[in-house]
Amino acid sequence: MPPAESPLRIELALGDITKERVDAIVNAANSGLRGGGGVDGAIHRAGGPEIMEECRRIGHCDPGDAVITGAGRLPARFVIHAVGPVWEGGRDDEELLLASCHERALELAREHGCRTVAFPAISTGAYGYPPELAARVALRATIEALERLPMIEKVRFVFVDENLLEIYGRALAHLKESAERSV
Ligand code: AR6
């Protein structure tokens, strides 16, 4: 399936984010930057031990924030480790934290001269964020951040799961319609 293009500089695609040839890929990390399962495990396995050495030196990242390291053996130049919220039923600022980890990841990308960035569906795996809600928050935060960061040319959201691709596709179409209505 070809990637879903969008005039908002956002693309959605199926695939393994560790294989993305972009300037920076974003990791769905934990606060301790200790590695783990899911996309975090895949990135450290494919990228090799250098990434974890840098994570150890950095030591910590609050939920809603992000830090940057090199990308070891990966085709990307950088890994941006973004910490999303654990879903607690929506009572614990999850929306704010999910939005802000996307914004911080894109700001870090800009500071390091990145023009292309790939995100996974942060918080939708082990952290349990309902994907329909996460899609809206992640995409809206990305669209808003890109308005302030014109040097970032393209953001790709990459999914291993076709169901997630569809959910994010619907959310993106909905956000585009609302944007078109408001101009
Ligand atoms: N490429 C793209 N997406 C992937 C890949 C991949 N190679 N592998 C998994 N996903 P998760 P979280 C998707 O659990 O919910 C870790 O242990 C997966 O289908 O990786 O933010 C960390 O260390 C899911 O939709 O991240 C943290 O402790 C999405 O990535 C914790 O999990 C995110 O799932 C973070 O949990």
Image (cartoon, rainbow, N blue to C red):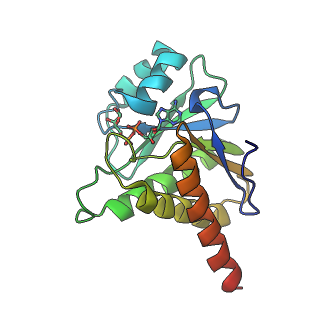
Q: Is residue 158 left or right of residue 127?
A: right
> Which residue shows up at 46% across the image and 14% down it?
49
Please tell me which residue lies in front, 128 or 93.
Answer: 128
The residue most toward the top is 49
Placement of 1 over or under 55, stated as above or below: below
Ligand 1 quarter of the rendering: top left
Position in image of residue 66 (x %, y %): 44, 45
Left or right? Give the position of 94 relative to 180.
left
Q: Quadrant of residue 130?
A: bottom left
89 on left or right of 182: left
**Front one among 146 and 54:** 146
**Residue 182 location, x and y as percent?**
66, 85
Q: Quarter holding the N terminus?
A: top right
Answer above or below: position of 29 versus 36: below
User: Residue drawn at (72%, 57%), measured in percent from left and top?
Assistant: 9
Locate residue 165, reporting x and y percent.
57, 48
> Image point 38% across, 41% down: which residue?
125
- Position of 61 relative to 49 (above/below): below
Marker count (numbered)? 0
Q: Residue at x 75, y 54 (%)?
A: 5
Tell me residue 170's x, y (percent).
Answer: 58, 62
**Residue placed most toward the observer, 115 or 122:** 122
